[in-house]
Amino acid sequence: MLTKFETKSNRVKGLAFHPRRPWILASLHSGVIQMWDYRMGTLLDRFDEHDGPVRGVHFHATQPLFVSGGDDYKIKVWNYKTHRCLFTLHGHLDYIRTVQFHAEYPWIVSASDDQTIRIWNWQSRTCVAVLTVVKYVLEGHDRGVNWASFHPTLPLIVSGADDRQVKLWRMNDTKAWEVDTLRGHMNNVSCAMFHAKQDIIVSNSEDKSIRIWDATKRTGIQTFRREHDRFWILAAHPEMNLLAAGHDSGMIVFKLERERPAFSVSGDTVFYVKDRFLRYYEYSTQKEVQVAPIRRPGTVSLNQSPRTLSYSPTENAILICSDVDGGSYELYIVPKDSAGRSDYLQEARKGAGSSAVFIARNRFAVLEKSSNNVLVKNLKNEIVKKTPLPVATDAIYYAGTGNILCKAEDRVVIFDLQQRLVLGELQAPTVKYVVWSSDMESVALLSKHAIIIANKKLVHRCTLHETIRVKSGAWDENGVFIYTTLNHIKYCLPNGDSGIIRTLDVPIYITRVIGNIIFCIDRDGKNKLVTVDASEYIFKLALFRKRYDHVMSMIKNSQLCGQAVISYLQQKGFPEVALHFVKDEKTRFNLALESGNIQIAVASAKELDDKDHWYRLGIEALRQGNVGIVEYAYQRTKNFDRLAFLYLITGYLDKVGFMCKIAGQNNNFMGQFHNALYLGDVRKRVEILENTGQLALAYVTAATHGLTEIADRLAAELGENIPSLPDGKASSLLIPPAPLMSCSDWPLLRVMRGIFDAGLDATGRADQDEDYDDAGGDWGDEDLEIVDVNNVVENGDVVDHSEEDEVNEEEGGWDLEDLELPPETETPKAAGPARSALFVAPTPGMPVSQIWTQKSSLAGEHAAAGNFDTAMRLLSRQLGIKNFAPLKPLFLDAHMGSHTFLRAFTSAPVISVAVEKGWSESASPNVRGPPALVFNFSQMDDKLKAAYKATTEGKFPEALRQFLSILHTIPLLVVDSRREVDEVKELIVIVREYVLGLKMEVKRKEMKDDPIRQQELAAYFTNCKLQKVHMRLVLTSTMGLCFKGGNYATAANFARMLLENSPNEAQSKKARQVVQACGDRKDGRQLNYDFRNPFVVCGATFVPIYQGQKNVSCPYCGSRFVPSVEGELCSICELSVVGADASGLLCSATQSR
């Protein structure tokens, strides 16, 4: 038995495979129906509407439906896409045993303990027939029959009963009769069925075993036992070689035999075994030839088909290994002229050994596992040499002439048999298959969920991890490893980059890759050709190997496109290449900025004409020192303050003066004053202060700078309000420092031109080349529309002189014709010499914060990286959180706590350094760990203890604050294991109960004038799940309150509950006194509280919601509310929207694996 998937649950009573998708339904004794993806090992959905065990389930062949029947006498039809029950069929009067959809008609067939079989039309939702006419009565079992099923093609029936027997029956048109009885089960036989593809019968029993029987010889083949679980049900996949069995504690999905064909590739040929024949297939001619028959093993057992095959081309010899007799091999030497002769039969040379491979032309090695030796044999099957192995070896593989690769439990070793030397060693999980490249320079080690790529000395290159099983692989002629999983063909580059080539409907086993054709064998032993598009991985490989001529050729000729290629190029530091594939202007703009290509950035910004894009363009141009572009960007965003400062630091003082005039015209007195400061123009400053009514400041400025005439005039106007000036102070005029490079661009960096620039300019850019030639290699006014600042008008629009009249006529514009402006200066040109000497600023590395968030779906890590917007989006999607106000300080703490800050020197900005979790000096600088978070689960434990203590001491507001603090911190927690995830979820439930209870208690203390409502709130508090010490305190308080309020029956009930909760002596005494005092007395007032009927308390209205009543819940804390509260903020956690659609808490990377 090869177990493919296993679940843990209540007793499984019914099973059904989906005919096409990798899904299985399991109906449980508890009434729940689970839908699993057995390929991925995940629970897809659960359906819980039946009362009592569900014994029958079945998928519809084409519609998104399944049907279920249970002990509640109900048949339910479900839509698994909408996750709900569509309707219920009533009619049976006892337990329903099985239900099935008809293969052709819109019918459901059901069988029940009421001794009827009913046919229902699921479209009209009516019962169309009740079958009571019996065609045959098959008598033979001594006790109750539990199961009977037909053979898929033959007129046979198999049955299992409580007499511990499996019986085989034959039938024809007129009668049915018993053929044979299969004995061996030690308890009631629960289920029996024929295998769809083999001549075997599978049965299971309450004796905790599954038995396999030969349907032809009617003998037992194999038995699989469980230690503690009785088996109840079997199911067979309608298309695939899969079975499922349900038992007391779950179910298993399994195969009886391996389906991977044994094959060996040699040159242009692949040898393989199919239908007990050795065959070969030629890739060049695509011809299949039958070589020789292979003897069938004498014993009847499973898993005895060939496991591995090794071929020696010079001797035309073949070694076939299988698990027969605990591991054995057969050696066939095929004459050249026997190919295609089906009558050729050769007696194979046999021997014992768990692995056997050719290591030379006429030598092969056999693993003797018991002694951990390798036996080297010749073609006569004679031992030539015996060599001990350096490690405890499970299997051996070919590793070059005279060498073998030994697989141990946790490592692989290359061993030279001649010199008895270990040539290489590599730590690896349990390796299943080894695939060498054609030149024997590289090897791929395939395990269940991982692929390790190494060189011929087993020096590690990269490791790939897969979530589903890896099935096979082969190297192509370019050194790319092509491999298959259960549902994909994928590629792996030498640097570890991988991707999907195409999806698969059924698993295949790759034998060879030639160009864009993949040769493979399927599970039926048929050779197939799969044509794929290899351009993506060939492009990436050329980029990795720096074959830039190939890259350029592919850019010219191929149809490469898509977000994946663009992201890959960005990630690998080639945004200028990604720019070639992009048509969207926003993406082009971003890539142009990233690659430092100002020309394209300007062109895209003009197309977009968006303030934000002009602003970002200005920042990048300033970084490169391209003053002309910065000036243009500031003009387009009408950012006159920045523009004036730019003119100051670049030495355009005449333009600063002009900006001062413009600010005055626009009544921007602060901007005008700043510009006067920049220029050191004291008279202008005094004039501005005087015009704005700041006479005292104007007088101080004039007097300080020696402008006595103006100072005297202002003193006369001020009269007695003249401000006093300090004595003995020497004053000096503040003049800004002179710019380092006046009136020109100042490039910060000059680097080599990008590798691809010349090629990209030559391909697909011919029309743009002409424009650049006309512009003389620079950006002039015609291309960029950069104009002198003299032409900037009030509303910030940039106009040419030819449009001056129109501007003057514009309503609301400035009339500047009377101003004495400085003579027109030449428009500054963009930086850079001629086109042949363009420079590109180097691309900065990816920030650690971006690495943290790139593949993470954990809100805590996004907050630590400073990406608050994505963290908020994640929390909104996962937990339905809308109110982020309580989380703001926690976001800030998370970000500050995961960074440290260094000051290099005084004039430089502070450097932010990301703090990684588990960092060490030996760690690779290229591998980044997750962020070190300030919040961890152990802190929650401490907070919980403090909250418990405050609750015990009766400090309810303080306790409530601490419990809410825990609830607010949990969304930002990150834990390492699934066990901790469960603990976090358990903590949410604990805290929620306390918050609800404490809010009711605080509310109760505020309601002094309503004794009935006080008693109700106290009673609801007792319904919360609290620690025993707190439950005793709540019960004592509520008991006293109800007793004083005259509700004696309710008080006595609380007293009895208190006595059941192990009270201390004082509490116990008080409770007994209350019970005695209340006696049979009834309640004086009616309370909205019924302790006999289970309920939950609405977190908003504090009223009970009894079982069966409609309610909605908070997607984060799980608090329940009356339906009218849906869409409002949860009053318990104060974060999420009640009834919002959310995917659930994600606080560990293990949840997304």
Image: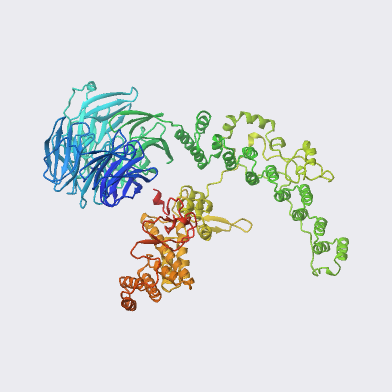
Viewer can see residue 325: no
Q: Quadrant of residue 282?
A: top left
- Classify residue 593 as left or right of residue 33: right
Locate residue 375, reporting x and y percent: 21, 39
Above or below residue 817? Residue 1011 is below
Locate residue 1072, reporting x and y percent: 31, 77
Above or below residue 104? Residue 978 is below
Q: Quadrant of residue 329?
A: top left
Tell me the residue at 46%/34% (across/down).
536
1035, 329: nearer the viewer: 1035
* Display coloring: rainbow
Tell me the residue at 49%/50% (across/down).
853
360, 1122: nearer the viewer: 1122
Q: Quadrant of residue 829?
A: top right
- Classify residue 756 as left or right of residue 810: left
Locate residue 126, reporting x and y percent: 31, 40
Above or below residue 350? Residue 468 is below
Locate residue 771, reporting x and y percent: 66, 31
Number of numbered markers: 0
Viewer can see residue 888: yes
Can you say which quadrant of the picture contains the N terminus? top left
